[in-house]
Amino acid sequence: MGGAKNSVLKLMAAALLAEGTTVISNCPAILDVPLMADVLRGLGCEVVLDDDVATITTPAQPKYHADFAAVRQFRASVCVLGPLVARCRRAVVALPGGDAIGSRPLDMHQSGLRLLGAHSEIEHGCVVAEADDLHGANIRLAFPSVGATENILMASVLAKGDTVIDNAAREPEIVDLCNMLTRMGAKISGAGSTTLTIRGVDRLHPTSHRVIGDRIVAATWGIAAAMSRGDVFVRGVNPNHVALVLDKLRAAGSQISIEASGFRVVQANRPQAVNFATLPYPGFPTDLQPMAIGLAAIAEGTSMITENVFEARFRFVEEMIRLGADARTDGHHAVVRGVPELSSAPVWSSDIRAGAGLVLAGLVADGVTEVHDVYHIDRGYPRFVEDLSDLGGDIRRVDSS
């Protein structure tokens, strides 16, 4: 299991906070890593990617303008905003692109920076922030946004005084970022809780850090085992990070074995219907909602899936219906009545997780299923086709150009 997509990109951005060379290992072989490397190079960093190691050398004076061409390709590029405000006291970051899963405004990012003493506006398609100085503040997030927590956290580590972030995101990737920042000399307490307390320091130093395992990829393989009545051992991830997912698989009839290095999922019979509701961590991840619908589609019984994070994620259901799923949506609920087997059809992926979910559905459908626009999958899953083939899936990538 490689490093977490939702962690490595933020860790790479954090390298902006310290002059010198930072080394990040266990980087996943996904498209977003070289994209983030390009963003950092545009800001004046030297970045070398060698196998699973990113070596980032940050200059004494980074540039503060993140180029539109690089930033527009993926959402996580906005995480350079906080570090640039902290280091340069100014940032111009093009509004990011990324997956089409619903509205993800930057209001909380900007309001947090304003409380730290920055002026921030949207100008000509860019987030612009500048400050004569940054000072500690008490900040309460309206929603435990991962991105807002990360940007405010990285801006506050070099602010004067103490900052408290209430209703902070609790994801393991936030803890991973806090651990790396602490290794760089930041003073942070409360990582993994709803309240982060940061005591600003004058400067940080570069460090070496290993990215945590990717809980979303790990859980995807676990759900794949349940859908296909298979047997999969997933290594390289903390099982505690997917505890709720494993509980749901147990309820679906899977046998789960936990070891220090990972977990094993064995599904002997047709899975049973289970209800899912996505929530911020430690709730069920919204990134696994397509896989949950895929599992429900071939389960015995009726499942309700409730999406509480991204309103547009249910466009995935339309593609599942093309595959023969008995599903309907009503607002932020989807009701899925399981069928014994899905039927093959051409389908289109709209984002990383939808693409992965459609491939898993195709593996349990009759005939040959074609999944188009699979470039999305490459942004979040290293060796996706190869790993599925190694696990016994009949799958191949076809160049349709």
Image (cartoon, helix red, strand yellow):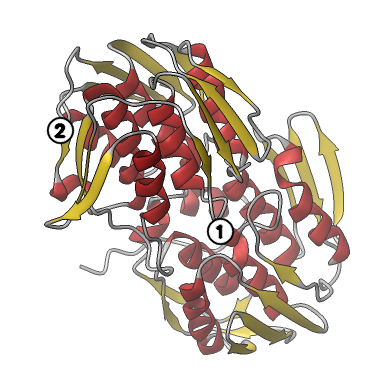
- Which residue is the site of mark 1? 287
The quadrant of the picture occupied by the N terminus is top right
Residue at the spot 46% in from the left edge and 66% down from the top edge: 355
Q: Amino acid at mark 1?
A: Asp
Cα distance, mark 1 to mark 2? 29 Å
Task: Report whether 198 appears left or right of 8.
Answer: right
Q: Residue at x 39, y 43 (%)?
A: 30
Q: Nearer the viewer, residue 139 or 248?
A: 139
Question: In which quarter of the view is residue 302 placed?
Answer: bottom right
Quadrant location of the C terminus in the rendered image:
bottom left
x, y percent for residue 323: 55, 85
Tell me the element at label 2. helix
154 sits left or right of 306 in the view: left
Q: Amino acid at mark 2?
A: Gly
**Which residue: 46% across, 19% down?**
161
Along the viewing direction, whichever of 192 and 393 lies nearer the viewer: 192
Task: Confirm whether residue 107 shows in the render.
Answer: yes
Residue occupied by mark 2:
42
Question: Percent from the top left, x then y, of residue 346?
Answer: 42, 82
